[in-house]
Image (cartoon, rainbow, N blue to C red):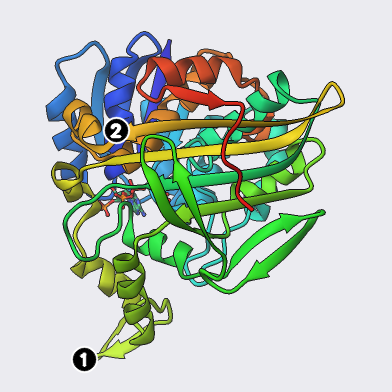
Amino acid sequence: MGKALIIGAGGVASVCVHKCCQNSDVFEEICIASRTKSKCDALKEKLDRGKTKISTAQVNADNVEELIELINKFKPDVVINLALPYQDLTIMDACLATKTDYVDTANYEPLDTAKFEYKWQWAYRERFEQAGITALLGSGFDPGVTGVFSAYAQKHEFDEINYIDILDCNAGDHGYPFATNFNPEINIREVSAKGSYIENGKWVETEPMEIKRVYNFPEIGEKDMYLLHHEELESLALNIKGIKRIRFFMTFGQSYLTHLKCLENVGMTSIEPIEFEGKQIVPLQFLKAVLPDPASLGPRTKGKTNIGCIFIGKKDGKDKTYYLYNVCDHQECYKEVGSQAVSYTTGVPAMIGAAMLLSGKWKKPGVHNIEEFDPDPFMDALNKFGLPWKESYSPELVD
Ligand code: NDP
C-alpha cells in the first residue's frame, strides 16, 4: 500500500521495523535511516528475507536539508520519527517541505530545558493543514495507546468522562542494580522533573515523586507507583469531554529510586554543561554513556508490564467506572522480536499509527493527537499485532 521512512535505529525503531515487516500488505517498502548506519544495516540484515523491501541510509535528523534530500530520494508516503524528541521539529520541517505525512511517539523537548509540552508542535497546525498533510503526534504506548483507549472509552462506554488515571507498571527485572528501559537521558529527564496533573482545567505541580500510591495490578500484583508529569495529560484534558481531573502514575522499585537520588545528589543527572579536562560535557549524557544500553536488556529482562487507563464518568445518568489495559511479557517480546517489552509496547503502536495513515483509515490534514481519530481500527490492530487489551468494569480505584 505504501512506503515508510523510519528515522532512528534504537530499541523502539527495531520493534517498529519488525512489525512493519509483519504487515507487509501495508508496508511494501521501508527505509531505515539513522545517525549510525551500521545499526540500520544490522536490522536490514535480520529482516531482509520477507516481503517488505528494505533499504537503509545515514542521516543526521538535526539537519533539515539532509532530511529533505533523503525524503526526495526515497519518496516515502509517511515518515515515522523514532529518533529522540529533540529531532521532532526538524523532521516536521522536512515533512512540510516535501508534503509527507508524519508520525512520532514523543513530543518535542528542547535540549537545554527538560520541559516537554505540545506548544511547539501544535504551532505547525495551520502549515500542515495548508500543505494537505497529516501529523500524528504520540503514537507509542503512553502517549499513544492511552489516547486510543480514552477515545474508545468516550465513544463506546461513556456519555461523559470525568476522571482518568493512567497507570504504567513495569514489573520487569533486568538484574542490574540500575538501568533504564529506554533512552537513559530521556528517561531520567522525565522522572527527575517535577510531577503535575490537571484538575479543573489547571495544572497542579508537585515535587518530584511527592505523590505515592500502592496499586494491585492485574496479573502482576502490588507495586509502588508515583505521580509524574506526562505529555498526554495536556492533550487528553482538551480532547476528552467533561474531564475534571487527569493523572499519570508510573511504578518504580526502591533500588531504582535510591540510585537515582544518589546520582541526583552528586550532580550526575544535571543537563547543565560542565568543564572537564578542557572539554564541555553534560553530566547526564556522560551518565548515559556508562549505563547499560537499553537495547542490551532484552535477553535479561523477566516479568511483565501492565499499562492502562481507569475511567470514571457517567453513562445514561449513572456513575460508571471502566479500566482498559494491556499486559505484556518481557520474555515473550524478546522471543518474538529480540527486544524487551518497553520498546515493544512503543514500537507496535508506532507501526499501527503509520499503517492508519498509509491505509487512509486516518487522514486529516493538520497536526493531531492520537485521541482525535476513530479508535476502532487501531484497537483491532492492537489485538492483531501483539498488544491485546483487556477490560474491567469494577477495577480497584486510586484515591
Ligand atoms: P534509542 O536511544 O534506543 O534510539 C534512538 C535512535 O535515534 C538511535 O538509533 C539514534 O542513533 C537515533 N538518533 C538520535 N539522534 C539522531 C539524529 N540527530 N539523527 C539521526 N538519528 C538520531 O531510543 P528509543 O528507541 O528507546 O526511543 C525512541 C523514541 O521513542 C524516543 O523519542 C523516546 O522518547 C520514545 N519513546 C516513547 C514511548 C511512548 O510510550 N510513547 C516509550 C519509550 C520511548 P545513534 O544510535 O547513532 O545514537
Q: Secondary structure at mark 2?
A: helix
Q: Residues under labels 2 and 1: Cα distance?
A: 39 Å
Q: Is residue 9 visible?
A: no
Query: How packed is label 2: few (under 14 Cα within 10 Å), some, or many (20 or more)?
Result: many
| Closer to the camera in the image, 180 or 319 | 319
Q: Quadrant of the N terminus?
A: top left
Q: Position of residue 218 (x, y in %)?
A: 43, 36
The image quadrant that residue 304 belongs to is top left
Picture quarter containing residue 58? Answer: top left
Near-viewer residue (380 or 301): 301
Give how far across and how far down residue 133 sits, in percent. 62, 28
Q: Amino acid at mark 2?
A: Val
Give the vertical position of 293 relative to 359 (above or below).
Answer: below
Residue appearing at x 72%, y 27% in the figure: 154
Q: Which mark is residue 269?
A: none
- Looking at the image, which residue is at 73% across and 45% down? 237
| Residue 100 % position (x, y) | 53, 29
Q: Is residue 71 visible?
A: yes
Instruction: Check disc 1 and give the amino acid type.
Output: Glu
Disc 1 target residue: 277
227 or 365: which is nearer to us? 227
393 lies above or below 1: below
Secondary element at tag 1: loop
**Closer to the camera: disc 2 or disc 1?**
2
Residue 95 relative to residue 170: left or right: right
- Residue marked by disc 2: 15
Which residue appears at 41% of the width and 39% of the height? 306
The picture quadrant where one finds residue 236 is top right
Q: Earlier in the sequence, mark 2 or mark 1?
A: 2
